[in-house]
Image (cartoon, rainbow, N blue to C red):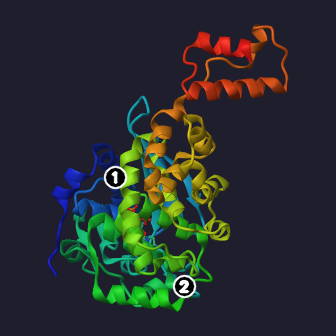
Amino acid sequence: MTTVYLIEEYEHHIPENIKKALLFCSKVADEANIPIFLIGGIVRDIIISRKNFDVDITVQGNAVEFAKLVQEKCPGICQVKEIHDAFKTAKIQFILNDNGDECVKIDLASTRKESYPCPACLPVIEKIGCELYEDVIRRDFTINSMALSLNQNSFCQLIDYLSGYSDIHQGLIRILHHNSFIDDPTRIIRALKFSVRFGYKLDDETQKLMHECLNSRRFDNLAGERVKLELKQALNINNAEVLTRFINENIYRLVDTELEIPPNIDDLSKKCEQTVKENMGFLYTDENIWLIYLGVLLLSRETLEKLYMSNQEQEIVINADMLAQKKHTLASAKTRFEVYEFFEKSRIESILAFLTKNYDLKDKVDLYLNELQDITLSINGDTLIKMGMQPGPNFGKLLREALRAKINGKIITHEEEIEFAKSF
Ligand code: CTP
């Protein structure tokens, strides 16, 4: 096997501040004679020239002790931020300049050997501080199982026991052993995520094992929050292919084996992607795109709870369906205010999920998003008191009617609002 060094790739794709922090780690590791490696996603992303700021180091030994050692040897620069003694993992933080804005966070893990006590259970640790090879073979795909040496005598040497480098160049997602999906079915969603993100194919055997796992329906022990995390990352890519394949390849069974499959999933997925792209400006964050996709599916409250979704996340998804159920109200809305009333209590994500399935009402949705949602009154309760009115339930009624008049274009200016209030 030829030895590959990724010195140029490292130089080009690792940001300067991260390189500085890694150099500190490297020196401490050399002094203490501890092998340390960049591992997993960051190595994959260096090879494919993709930015990745999640720095994962694996320490062949005890990562907690190593973290403390780096803190001790780099006083004022490195601090241990978190320690998980059971897993022997730690988080350290480097502050590389005086004003403290050049900050690098690094996750340190000890090499570990794991096994799965039952299908879809969380793994148990068999050994900490094992050989790198044992740490690597517990992982998901060949493209995520490469390590890059950080010790000076082998700096940037690629450790690639399972041909991840060649799989990257062939665009292949390949699991490492037959039981990988049975052990951890969330890897099926990860395979979908990486496949769509990078445009890679699942190799034939991996594809076959994925189907076998999905047909087995052995997901009783699967933790909902892990499924949620992977689903969120996959759907947040905002690519129609994720939803289409999620349904067509039966991956939805991980979420709800009884899911009612929407007809024309291909069209629906494309509409969803397009809707999100066209309306991105209305979203406060792109972290919630996945909720729009889930809003398009008919997921029950029970399923959402099983995924450990927060109340707000659940409301967004359920509300999309509630809007759809009373769509006739919107269809028959004659005034601008009726359109406003239909959407006013909904989050943008629910509205976009509704739009995806109801393109015939696009004009009204666009009207709400582009104009109506931003209309507010310039008068409020205080204004009315200053005008000499007695506070009471009528205030609410008056302000609501003023808003109706304003949204319907009957009043426009502040003075007109005041006049409206006087005449109410
Ligand atoms: N991993 C795994 N099985 C999982 C999740 C993660 O084997 N179910 C391993 C993989 O080696 C992965 C590493 O843990 O590379 C880190 O996981 P994570 O941070 O979730 O993934 P990344 O590969 O960094 O992917 P992303 O770019 O999406 O963050």
* Residue with the mark numbered 2: 116
Say which element carries label 1: helix
Q: Could you say which is closer to the camera, residue 367 or residue 112?
A: 367
Amino acid, disc 1:
Leu
Percent across and percent down for residue 354 are 51, 55
Q: Could you say which is closer to the camera, residue 185 or residue 362?
A: 362
135 vs 295, left or right, is left
Q: Quadrant of the N terminus?
A: bottom left
Percent across and percent down for residue 365 are 48, 45
The image quadrant of residue 314 is: bottom right
Q: Nearer the viewer, mark 1 or mark 2?
A: 2
Residue 34 seen in the current view: no
| Residue 22 - label | 1
Name the residue at 64% across, 52% down: 312
Q: Could you say which is closer to the camera, residue 3 or residue 255?
A: 255
Amino acid, disc 2:
Tyr
